[in-house]
Image (cartoon, rainbow, N blue to C red):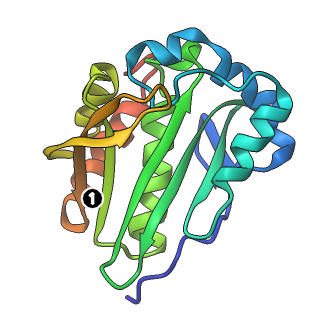
């Protein structure tokens, strides 16, 4: 199968719906970024956008070639965002990143189902051979959530990325390969079949 770029189609699950992020989502997305709990675990941004105009600027920066940001919706309400990015068709790889959910949805089916939809699009629709997921080493909650998906921890990129506060983060890199996807998919389907999962 030829490898195809993600096409920005809506991705619909039983609980969440992913639609390409637009500037019109700024007002709904702002409360997700405004909650101080988001920044207590090493999120790359140091502080939330100050207002809807700031949120629109942040969305604009994410609307660039090679990156498809999605609004994550539950019951029609935006509860977060995640992206397919760093698309490399020659090497058959992409990256799921820029993920943030309102803390009220941490530990629910939102993250596993969002990842199920994004991974399904990457592997089944687009034909990628590798999907990377990474996070700040300080973000132990995110590291645990990525490992629970069934991703393999590959290592740590030391002093890899400057945070907005000027400090440098160590980045923990995980991946899922095409031949691992069927087992990961079944694991995620089992998790999303229940309620209140991590």
The one of 138 and 122 positioned closer to us in this rendering: 138
The one of 6 and 11 positioned closer to us in this rendering: 6
Question: Which image quarter holds the N terminus?
Answer: bottom left
Query: Does residue 6 appear left or right of residue 186 in this picture?
Result: right
Q: Secondary structure at mark 1?
A: helix
Q: Is residue 157 above or below residue 143?
A: below
Q: Given the current orientation, which residue lies at the most extreme bottom position?
A: 2
| Residue 76 in view in this figure | no
Q: Residue at x 50, y 51 (%)?
A: 117
Q: Is residue 155 above or below residue 144?
A: below
Give how far across and how far down residue 57 sits, in percent.
Answer: 76, 43
The one of 17 and 65 positioned closer to us in this rendering: 65
Give how far across and how far down residue 174 sits, in percent.
Answer: 23, 47
Q: Is residue 75 above or below residue 161?
A: above
Q: Given the current orientation, which residue lies at the most extreme front position?
A: 166
Question: Which image quarter holds the C terminus?
Answer: top left
**Badge count:** 1
| Residue 90 in view in this figure | yes
Q: Residue at x 22, y 35 (%)?
A: 147
Q: Which residue is mark 1?
A: 181
Query: Does residue 38 appear left or right of residue 74 in this picture?
Result: left
Give how far across and how far down residue 110 sits, in percent.
Answer: 52, 30
Query: Does residue 181 appear left or right of residue 161 in this picture?
Result: left
Crowd rating for badge 1 (residues with CA inside 10 Å; few <14, some 14–19, many 20+): many
Q: Is residue 85 above or below residue 96?
A: below
Query: Does residue 83 appear left or right of residue 91 in this picture?
Result: right
Quadrant of the rendered image containing residue 162: top left
Q: Residue at x 33, y 77 (%)?
A: 92
Q: Residue at x 79, y 28 (%)?
A: 28
Give how far across and how far down residue 112 sits, in percent.
Answer: 42, 36
């Amino acid at each position: 199968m030829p490898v195809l770029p993600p096409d920005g189609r809506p991705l619909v699950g039983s609980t969440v719906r992913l639609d390409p992020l637009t500037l019109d989502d700024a007002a709904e997305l702002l409360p997700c970024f405004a909650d101080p709990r988001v920044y207590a675990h090493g999120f790359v941004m140091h502080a939330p956008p100050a207002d809807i105009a700031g949120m629109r600027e942040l969305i604009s920066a994410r609307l660039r070639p090679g990156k498809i940001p999605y609004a994550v919706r539950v019951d029609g309400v935006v509860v977060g965002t995640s992206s397919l990015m760093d698309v490399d068709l020659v090497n058959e790889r992409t990256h799921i990143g820029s993920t943030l959910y309102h803390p009220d949805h941490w530990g629910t089916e939102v993250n596993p189902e969002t990842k199920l939809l994004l991974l399904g699009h990457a592997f089944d629709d687009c034909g990628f051979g590798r999907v990377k997921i990474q996070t700040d080493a300080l973000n132990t909650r995110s590291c645990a959530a990525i490992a629970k998906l069934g991703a393999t921890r590959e290592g740590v990129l030391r002093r890899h990325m400057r945070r907005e506060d000027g400090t440098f983060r160590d980045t923990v890199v995980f991946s899922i390969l095409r031949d691992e996807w069927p087992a990961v998919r079944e694991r995620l389907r089992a998790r999303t079949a229940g309620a209140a999962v991590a």
